[in-house]
Amino acid sequence: MAAVEVRNGYKYYGSKSNPKIVLNQLNMNVMRGSIYGLLGASGCGKTTLLSCIVGQRRLNGGEVAVLGVKPGEPGSGVPGSRVGFMPQEIALVEEMTVKETIFYFGRIYGLTDERIREKFKLLKELLQLPPATQMIKQCSGGQQRRLSFACAMIHDPELLILDEPTVGLDPMLREKIWDFLVETTRNSKLAVIITTHYIEEAKQANCIGLMRNGVLLAEDTPTNIMIKFGTQSIEDAFLILSQRQGNEDELAQIMDHNKNQALPAAVLPPEVIDTHEPNTPEKPPIPFEEPLNENRKKIFFTTKGRVKALMTKNFVQLFRQPSGIIFMLLFPIIQLTCFYLAIGKTPTNLEIGVYSGEVENYGECFDENLVTVYKDNDNESCLFNKLSCRYIRELGDDVATRKYYASEADALSDAKRATTVGYLHFAQNFSDSILSVMEDGIHTSDGAVDHAELSIHIDMTDQQVAYFMQRKLRDKFSTFMRSVVKDCNVSTAIVDLPVQFQEPIFGSTDIEFQQYCAPGVVMTMVFFLATLMTAAVFISERMDGIWDRTLLAGVSATEMLWAHLLTQLIIMALQSFEVIMYIGLVFDTYNNGDTTTLIGLLTLTAFCGMLFGLFISVFCKSHTEANFVATGAFYPMIILCGLLWPLESMPQFLQDLVMVLPFTIPSISARNVIEKGWSITHEKVYNGFLVMAGWTIIFFVLCLIGIRRKA
């Protein structure tokens, strides 16, 4: 019985109008209990043919049957445990050890751990595998190829497909592998398809197929192939085939001359074929049932062995890479430390000029005997003396270092040269003007009102420093005026303070910019850390061939996706807990609400970021392309989420748009928990969960669609 049958196989890439034909009406038979050597120049379609045989790709036309069934049919075992596949690339996880790699593939194929240990012992001796505890990345190229071969053989498949298995191996080991394959196929129904660049070793195959430009030009025993081409070796026959590129007539003449037998049909016109209607009715599929064991027990839509294998691989990949540990555990700490140490702190080393017209010698401002408020109990009034000195004393050095000037012109000159950040100006009649405002109230003259104010001149080119200085100076002036009124202690004393701070409804009057920004910063940080890490892992798996090889072992894309989701969910929950505890214990960040709610929101945010990273990895072919996409998405989200500037300042259409972005409402929800102490039952809190959950579902669905289309 044939193990593999290909009839009129047709495959092309590109569009229908401009197709690149890879397989053109190809016919192929591989019998059970035999070795089939597939030879051909690079780019002739060998790898594409093998991928169609194992169900990784589909033909555009024609039929393929493997072990009596169409690849990919439910319960066929193809791809799956009936087929063993060794690709050209190593396709192994570098962070895993030799033993872990064998157990990974054994569990995926459903073998018990005891059976895996037995097979590992046999294959280790046969293939001279490295020590069990040696990591893949520490193995030589030859050792890695031998281990890759062992992974294809671990489950005793019915069909073994080897794509360049002996590249980089020494001659003695190549001979040993071939002897093993010949002996195994002779004594069992195992069918082997092997491609090799070592042409002469293919003489040991039972049948050889010579392939060029997507067409099987010859399919026969090695002896008959040499007779057809009139050569003494398979290599010479292959060279004749390769050197006659584009000249089928010459090849036909050579073969007719030597063996009065025509070649198969030449390359057909480049006509795109979408479907192929078989002339004979389809054969009923051969039922295939795997024996039940511990690792084949069903867990929802997967098995215990696959869950164990996939989860182990995912955790090993993350935590055996220094970059993985840094990314997952240390990066959040480093970034939060930078944020809390650099943002929202009081600026230091600032110098501000001071000019007071009512003071000739600034030293008298610090005279302990200086009295600035005199109370006249008889007239129920007060007298003020050099109040500017009182303000200068109360200002202190916590805001800025003070530099005193004899004239306003000198203070202005230094400010223009940026020697100081600005200067304060007190009018010559500053104290008398304040008294006039207190006594006359609304009847005070405009001049007295102007001279009673603190005149602040600040360099506005540095907006952050200017904002800080203005706020602090005005706060100090408000406190100063309150103390003056209190010292005066007269019932008729009424003063219109420049700034009146009332008791806040939520929070405190001295809330820092840092506390306001913290929720948004933390959420964007965990989101994009998860995005970059996930995109890197998935793209690496795809580029290294691990993703495709696992699919060929019978694991579905959905199973692999859920395994990654579960792994990341555990890590993200740990990371969110770490972040909340770190900023609370180390930086004493207060939280008036429920910590569990914040951890839940952060975990959901990181989970959404992971799915966004997976979405990027599905459609990006390289790490560079993925980084460009992630970076391009990062800045618009940061700018538009209200973290840097109030949402109310945006045009209405933009306000409506940003409300559905992943960070806008969730950041507000986190701030409501921290500052207002609201629980998850409050509308302004649970709506953040709803928005993040919505984006999570959107990314998940897009990932499933993308992965299935790619598969």
Image (cartoon, helix red, strand yellow):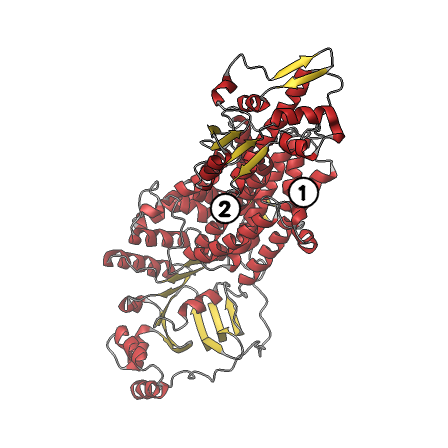
Determine the residue positioned at 66% across, 39% down: 669
Residue 265 in the image: x percent, y percent? 43, 84
**As shown in the figure, which amino acid type bears the numbered disc 1?**
Gly
Residue 571 screen position, x and y as percent:
52, 39
Q: Is residue 368 above or below residue 281?
A: above
Q: Residues within 10 Å of mark 1 (few under 14, many from 20)?
A: many
Which mark lies nearer to you, 2 or 1?
1
Q: Which residue is mark 1?
A: 688
- What percent of the width, then of the height, locates residue 107? 48, 46
Q: Secondary structure at mark 2?
A: helix
Q: Which amino acid, mark 2?
A: Leu
Question: Is 416 above or below relative to 487?
Answer: below
Which label's residue is closer to the chain start, 2 or 1? Answer: 2
Q: What residue lies at 70% left-to-right and 15% top-to-bottom?
A: 489
Q: Left or right: 623 with respect to 228?
A: right
User: Which mark, residue 310?
Assistant: 2
State the residue in front, 398 or 141.
398
The answer to whether one can see residue 112 in this image is no
Relative horizontal placement of residue 320, taking residue 697 as reference (left or right): left
For residue 288, side relative to residue 187 (left or right): right
Q: Is residue 4 visible?
A: yes
State the image quarter where residue 504 is shown.
top right
Secondary structure beneath label 1: helix
79 left or right of 218?
Answer: right
**Crowding near pointer 2: few (<14 within 10 Å), some, many (20+)?**
many
Mark 2–mark 1 contact, CB under 8 Å? no
Please name whichever residue, 234 or 86, is drawn nearer the observer in this view of the structure: 86
Above or below for 69 versus 702: below
Residue 216 locus on image (x, y percent): 40, 77
